[in-house]
Image (cartoon, grey):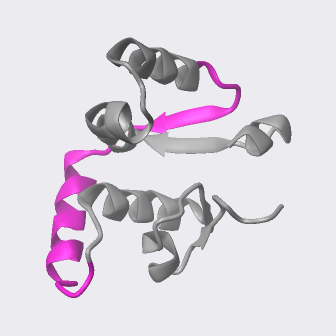
């Protein structure tokens, strides 16, 4: 992410990603609760960041999408991100869990630049 910011590349995330971060950030990122909300505030201040709010329509479409793929372990957050990425023609994700690769995207975390 630091490289993308340094290069002036646009960053897009969703309110679902932020919700997931609030739920898991303290444990996964070893943050205090105060540190968690400071990180969220700093993310919101990044130049060229857009936080897309997932609509009820997208939410419902992606529930169906996931229901039709019982062999996948993707989360609703993943599915809504895939939707936004397909809609905007985005092919790269700041991810590393393999889900975005499975869905046909390029995962950029832990990838040599």
Q: Which residues are magenta?
A: 45-72
Q: Position of residue 19 (x, y in %)?
A: 30, 36
The residue that appears at 33% across and 17% down in the rendered structure is 33
Q: Residue furthest bottom?
A: 71
Q: Position of residue 1 (x, y in %)?
A: 68, 43
| 7 in relation to 36, above or below | below
| 24 in relation to 36, above or below | below
Can residue 21 be seen in this snapshot? no
Q: Position of residue 56 (x, y in %)?
A: 19, 47
Can residue 39 be seen in this snapshot? yes
| 60 in relation to 86, above or below | above
Taking the image as shown, residue 58 lies to the left or right of residue 30, namely left
The magenta stretch spans residue 47: yes
Q: Position of residue 58 (x, y in %)?
A: 27, 56
The residue that appears at 22% across and 84% down in the rendered structure is 69
Taking the image as shown, residue 103 lies to the left or right of residue 111, namely left
Residue 29, located in which quarter of the rendered image? top left
The magenta stretch spans residue 77: no
Taking the image as shown, residue 43 lies to the left or right of residue 3, namely left
The residue that appears at 43% across and 65% down in the rendered structure is 82
The residue that appears at 33% across and 36% down in the rendered structure is 27
């Amino acid at each position: 992410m630091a490289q993308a910011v340094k290069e002036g590349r646009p960053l897009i995330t969703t309110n679902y990603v932020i919700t997931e971060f609030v739920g898991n950030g303290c444990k996964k990122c070893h943050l205090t609760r105060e540190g968690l909300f400071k990180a969220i505030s700093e993310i919101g201040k990044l130049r060229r960041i857009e936080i897309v709010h997932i609509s009820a329509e997208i939410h419902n479409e992606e529930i169906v999408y996931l229901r039709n793929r019982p062999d996948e372990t993707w989360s609703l957050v993943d599915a809504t991100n895939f939707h936004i990425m397909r809609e905007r023609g985005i092919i790269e994700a700041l991810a590393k869990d393999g889900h975005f690769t499975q869905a046909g995207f390029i995962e950029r975390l832990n990838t040599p630049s």
